[in-house]
Image: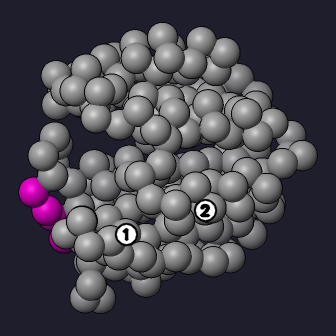
C-alpha cells in the first residue's frame, strides 16, 4: 500500500505539525500506552508513524520502538528529525517486520486509511503475531451513529470513520479485550475522536 498523497504533502506536514500531539488527551493516552508496554519483550511498533514524533516520544519513555509507514516522504522526515529511532517502510499489515517479537502496537489515525474489510483482517494478523497481554492502542476519527465504518473527505487520502463500539467489536473478534476508551471532541475539529486500548487475550 502506497500513500502518494502523504508523499506530496510531507514537507507541509513537517511545517504544520512540529509536535507529537495536537490535544492534551492524546499525550495522556500515549503515556498510558507506554506504561502498559513497559517491560514487555520485543519492539513497540508505531503503525503509520508519519513524521516519527510519537515514536520518538515513546522511545524517550524507554520503549524499544520502530516506526513504520508506507510513505517514503514521511519516512525521510522521520529519519532526519529522529535519527535515534528505527523506521521502516511498511504498511499496517507489518508484512516486512519479521525480526523478533512485537511488544506492543500503536496505530494513531493510520487505520482510517485502510479499507474497513481490510482493517478486520489486519487486526487479526496482529493478533496472530503477538502474545497474551500485548497492548494495542488505536486512535481514529469517530462516527456519532452506531453502524459500519463510513467514508469521509480526508484531505490527503481515502479515509473512514468508525463508531467506537464498532471498532471495539473488530478488536474483540480478533482476540483483543478492551481495557479503556476515550472519546473526545474539540471545538476546532469537525469530528469526535476516539482512542481504544486493548490487550491480547
Reading the image, the residue beneath label 2 is: 29
Secondary-structure class at tag 2: helix
Disc 1 residue crowd, few under 14, some 14–19, many 20+, Cα 10 Å: many
Residue 35 sits above or below residue 81 on the image: below
Disc 2 residue crowd, few under 14, some 14–19, many 20+, Cα 10 Å: some
Tell me the chief SS of the magenta region: strand
Residue at position x 12%, y 46% in the image:
155
Is there any visible trace of residue 136 in the rendered image?
A: no
Residue 27 sits above or below residue 155 on the image: below
Please report the bounds of the magenta region as a residue range: 149-153
- Give residue 189's quadrant in the image: bottom left
- Location of the N terminus by quadrant is top left
Q: Nearer the viewer, residue 86 or 200?
A: 86
Q: Which of 84 and 135 is in front in this view?
A: 84
Reading the image, the residue beneath label 1 is: 193
How far apart are labels 2 and 1 at the CA level? 12 Å
Is there any visible trace of residue 11 in the rendered image?
A: yes
Task: From the top left corner, tell me how far across and down residue 11 is, in percent.
Answer: 25, 20
Task: From the top left corner, tell me how far across and down residue 19 is, in percent.
Answer: 46, 38
Secondary-structure class at tag 1: strand
Residue at position x 71%, y 61% in the image:
32
Amino acid at each position: 500500500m502506497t500513500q502518494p498523497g502523504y508523499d506530496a504533502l510531507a514537507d507541509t506536514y513537517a511545517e504544520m505539525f512540529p509536535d507529537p500531539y495536537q490535544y492534551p488527551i492524546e499525550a495522556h493516552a500515549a503515556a498510558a500506552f507506554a506504561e502498559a508496554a513497559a517491560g514487555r519483550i520485543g519492539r513497540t511498533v508505531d503503525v503509520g508513524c508519519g513524521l516519527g514524533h510519537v515514536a520518538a516520544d515513546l522511545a524517550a519513555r524507554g520503549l524499544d520502538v520502530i516506526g513504520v509507514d508506507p510513505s517514503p516522504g514521511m519516512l525521510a522526515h522521520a529519519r532526519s528529525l529522529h535519527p535515534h529511532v528505527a523506521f521502516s517502510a511498511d504498511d499496517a499489515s507489518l508484512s516486512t517486520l519479521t525480526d523478533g517479537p512485537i511488544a506492543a502496537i500503536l496505530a494513531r489515525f493510520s487505520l482510517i486509511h485502510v479499507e474497513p474489510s481490510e482493517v478486520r483482517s489486519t487486526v487479526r494478523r496482529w493478533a496472530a503475531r503477538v502474545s497474551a497481554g500485548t497492548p494495542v492502542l488505536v486512535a481514529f476519527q469517530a462516527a456519532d451513529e452506531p453502524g459500519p465504518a463510513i467514508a469521509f473527505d480526508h484531505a490527503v487520502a481515502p479515509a473512514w470513520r468508525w463508531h467506537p463500539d464498532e471498532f471495539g467489536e473488530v478488536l474483540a473478534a480478533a482476540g483483543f479485550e478492551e481495557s479503556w476508551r476515550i472519546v473526545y471532541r474539540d471545538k476546532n475539529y469537525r469530528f469526535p475522536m476516539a482512542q481504544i486500548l486493548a490487550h491480547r487475550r
